[in-house]
Structure formats: C-alpha cells, structure tokens
Amino acid sequence: MRHFLSQLEKFFPLLRNSTLPAFLFGLSLLSFYGGSPFEAQSIINLHIAFCSLSLLCFLILVYFNRNKPSFFLLIIFSSYILINYLKNTLGESSLSSASYLNLCTFISLNIGLFYYLPEQKLLTRQSVYILLFLFFEYTIGEHLSRAGISIIPQAEFGSISGLESINLLLFAIVLISQFITSSLTGRILDSGLFFASLCIGFGLYYADSNTSLPLFFGTAIFITLLSGIEHLYQSTYKDELTELPGRNSFLLHSKDFPLKYSIGLILIDDYERLSKVFGRQGINSLVKMISQRLQDTETEAQIYRYNDDEFVVLFRGEDKKSAFNRVEQMRRSIASAEFMLRGYKKPIKLTVSGSVSEKKRSDANAVEVLVRADKALQKAYRFTQNITSQA
C-alpha cells in the first residue's frame, strides 16, 4: 500500500503542471474536429498567427537565454515551413514522397533528442555544435530525398494518413518516453514539451488537411512558450527539487519582513561527501526528504532553500532565544530520523547544523542578519557538527 501511494504521489506534480497544456491541446482537438474544414481566410489567419507567435516565442527565449525550449521551437518552426513547402511543390503526392517520410523521421528523432537536452544557456559553444548537427542532418536528408530514398522504408499496414506506419510507431515511442519522464520529474517544462510533442504528432497525422498544421503546430508553439516562461519563473524564485521558495524569493521577500524577526540557518553536514557517496540522484532524494522533515517539524515559520546544502528559516516576531529552541528542535528531528534511500537496504542517518541570528536596529537588511548567522555557524563548524549555535 505504501509503495502504491509513493508511486501515485509522483503523478500529482504531472497533473498539477499539465492542466494548462492539456487544456490547450484539448481545445485544439475540439477546434479541429468541430470546425474543420476552415474557410480559406481563417487558414490564412492561422498561418499569420503561427508566424507571429513563433517570432514572439523566439525573442523571449533568446532574451532569457534558454536552450531547451529554443531548440524545440526551432524544430517546430522549421518542420512547419518544410512541410508546407513540400505540399506546395509536390501537391497531393507530397505525403507519400521520400522527402516527407525522411522529414517525419527527423522530427521524431529531434524532439526526442531535444527533450532530454541538459538545460543550460542558449548562447554557448554546444548550441553551435547542435546547429551544425541539424544542418548536416537535413543536408543528408535532402540528398537522400532527391534520390528517392527514405531513411525508414515504407511498410503499409493500413491507412496512416500523414504518418507512415513505422514513423508513427517511432513517434509513439518518443511520446511514451516523454510521458514517463514528465510523470517522474513533475517539472512543468517536461510536461509542457510532452503536450507540444503531442500536438506535433497530431499535426503530422492529419497533415493532409490544410487546417492541421497551423492549428496543431501553433498550439505546440504556444504551449512551448507558456511552459518555458513558467519554468523560468519557477526556477528563478522556487527550488524545483524541494518546491520551497529559493534564494531569489528570500531576497525579494526580505523587504517585507517585519521589524522584529530572527533568521535560522540550517546546513546539511558533510554535503560534499554525501554527494560523492550517493551520486546526484541519491543526494537529491536525501535533500528532498530532509526538506520534508524540516517542514513537518516547523509548520509556522517560512523555510527557504538558500543553497544546495543550506536552508534559511524566517521566524516572524520571534527573538533569538525562541528561534534557537525551534531550530534546535529541527536539528534534533533530522538527527533522530532514519532515511530510506532506494537501492539501500539499511536506513541512512544524517545530521544538520544550525545557527540563529536576531534582527538588530543597525541591520540595513535581512542579508546582514543572515551573514551574522552564517559567521556563527562557520565558527562552531570548526570544532564540531550536528549542533545549533547563535550569533
């Protein structure tokens, strides 16, 4: 029963972060099935909206220097242009041509590749290499298409509309992989890009319709834009791992702190050694469990994840003595707990060290209070760990 609940809990972030992308995807389906065929002027308006939205999305993502949604946008836009070019030049035979089959194969592979692209800044040397790879990829595809050779041979298992059978299977594998990943991570960007890929799949499946491409690809662009912006906001002001407010939130909220308050600083002992022993995934799981334990112990104060190994606790209206007792209680709660990590049969014992500092009249801002708490913690840390000190 406990295992079932733990697995079910993983889907809650997916459901929470998928509401808007799922709504937009559903709206595009209703519009397509309920409104097709659209009038010629409506289709032209959809084309204009797609190009305008693509430009807006590109400018925003480049401004914020985000690589993953930017390359996703590039695939959507370039695919849209190339498919329309093939339909205009080859006419009714375009969807059965080697050019279209190769393009569908590249689209499936690329959205799978860029979905798992490590997130970093867009303007890097790695991005240049990716652009060169795409240029080389489409160059190879063009030469094969001119020779009438498709990368994946046709296999007729019935009418598959705009997606040939094996390409449809490949696309389905990519979508299943994305769905599993977004379910496990619960990150809004992963969920958004999954629904954007789903829109691309429907756009290709109904590519023989003049409505499908601008409608579904436009929805994919819109979902990519919204999920990219929301992810940027979440990663800036909220810690994705623990879902606690982050460092930027602390600095932003500090101007609204009351006249009287105390700040507690909690440091995970031996964090670097733990990272080497348990690896990235293991330490992330431990940090998440420590965070949950702290929140269960201290239900009134505001907790921030300030650094990878540090938590900051704001005690509104509390003096140093009262805050010290509450931080000490949090420290003891961690020390007495046993943490079970997947792959390890024995429970893991962890400790944290804490420090408390009270707001003084001479303090210009909350950072000075925090710095004083950090100095007290570092001073005590020279001699021992698993202890609470006060400035």
Image (cartoon, helix red, strand yellow):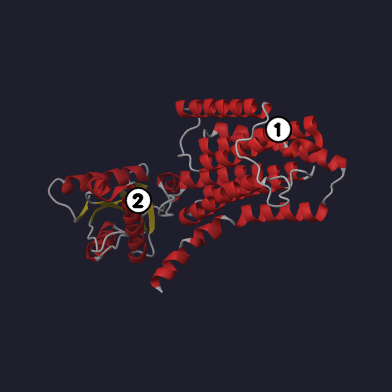
Local SS, label 1: helix
Q: Is residue 51 left or right of residue 284?
A: right
Residue 123 visible here: no
Q: Residues within 10 Å of mark 1 (few under 14, many from 20)?
A: few
Point out the residue furthest to the left here.
383
Q: Is residue 102 left or right of residue 257?
A: right
Q: Nearer the viewer, residue 9 or 362?
A: 9
**Residue 246 position in % (x across, y down):** 41, 48
- The residue under the point 75% across, 36% down is 94
Q: Is residue 312 left or right of residue 78?
A: left
Amino acid, disc 1: Ile
**Residue 86 position in % (x across, y down):** 74, 32
- The residue under the point 45% across, 45% down is 252
Q: Which mark is residue 281?
A: 2
**Residue 29 position in % (x across, y down):** 73, 54
Quadrant where the image shows the N terminus: bottom left
Q: Nearer the viewer, residue 94 or 192?
A: 94
Amino acid, disc 2: Gln
Query: First in sequence: mark 1 or mark 2?
Result: 1
Q: Residues within 10 Å of mark 2 (few under 14, many from 20)?
A: few
Q: Which residue is mark 1?
A: 81
